Amino acid sequence: MDESEKSGVPQGDVTRRQFLIAGTAGMVLSGLPRTVYGQSSTAAHALAPVLTKVSFTVNGKNHELELDTRTTLLDALREHLKLTGTKKGCDQGQCGACTVLSGGRRINSCLTLAVMHQGDSITTIEGLGTPDKMHPMQAAFVKCDGYQCGYCTPGQICSAVAVLGEIKAGIPSHVTADLTAAPELNAAELRERMSGNICRCGAYSNIAEAITEVAGRTQ
């Protein structure tokens, strides 16, 4: 054995660069847990879902579900309770299509886990009204044509209902000029408060008209 073989330097057609790359890859792999490059009993256990029971009220009805702890409220509503009125848009909390009401407060149901709402009261678009007995905001959206494709509409309506509740309660927004006075229902307030609900069809003026009409009837 010559000196080059003793030193471990590769011979033949293997270049120094190839040798270094192979050696680096080996060191990286040796430092990884077995679950990354080979399944083990530990890996299988880690991937197994953890189920838990959660009880909450949805649209006035009590429900008890056994869910994977990773299940979002949105998926619990759509996939387990079959309340498909709440839409899955971006699934990242950016579009507002999944907006529902939790205790009267609007939330993005795609960003919260179902298990976090144990004992809560959830209202979806189906709980606001029915085709035979629509909520005033639903009726106003129909009258003012506050939608085109309609995909964002359930979230828009839930958010609009919450907006009127916020203004009535005197909760200021980012554009409220006087924090000591009751917020006004004007175009700037509506734009700011509804900015989390995106309408890709651009029916914003009709949506604002529908909210304003309901506000005028409830004052």
Image (cartoon, rainbow, N blue to C red):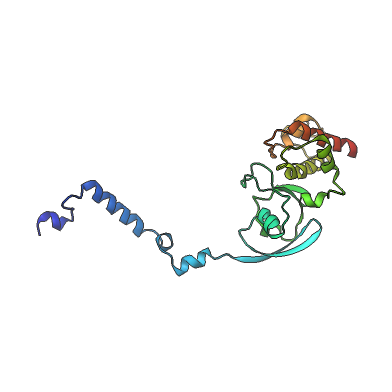
Q: Position of residue 194 (x, y in %)?
A: 73, 37
Q: Residue at x 75, y 45 (%)?
A: 154
Q: Is residue 207 visible?
A: yes
59 lies left or right of 44: right
Position of 19 relative to 136 (above/below):
below
Image-quadrant location for residue 30: bottom left
Image-quadrant location for residue 122: bottom right
Number of residue marks: 0
Q: Residue at x 84, y 37 (%)?
A: 143
Look at the image and tell me in which quarter the C terminus lies: top right
Q: Residue at x 71, y 39 (%)?
A: 149
Q: Position of residue 102 (x, y in %)?
A: 75, 52
64 lies left or right of 16: right
94 lies left or right of 43: right
Q: Position of residue 89 (x, y in %)?
A: 65, 45
Q: Position of residue 53 (x, y in %)?
A: 68, 66
Q: Among all residues in the image, which is located at the extreme bottom?
A: 41
Look at the image and tell me in which quarter the N terminus lies: bottom left
Q: Residue at x 64, y 50 (%)?
A: 111
Q: Nearer the viewer, residue 146 or 94?
A: 146
Q: Nearer the viewer, residue 201 or 38?
A: 201
Q: Is residue 183 visible?
A: no
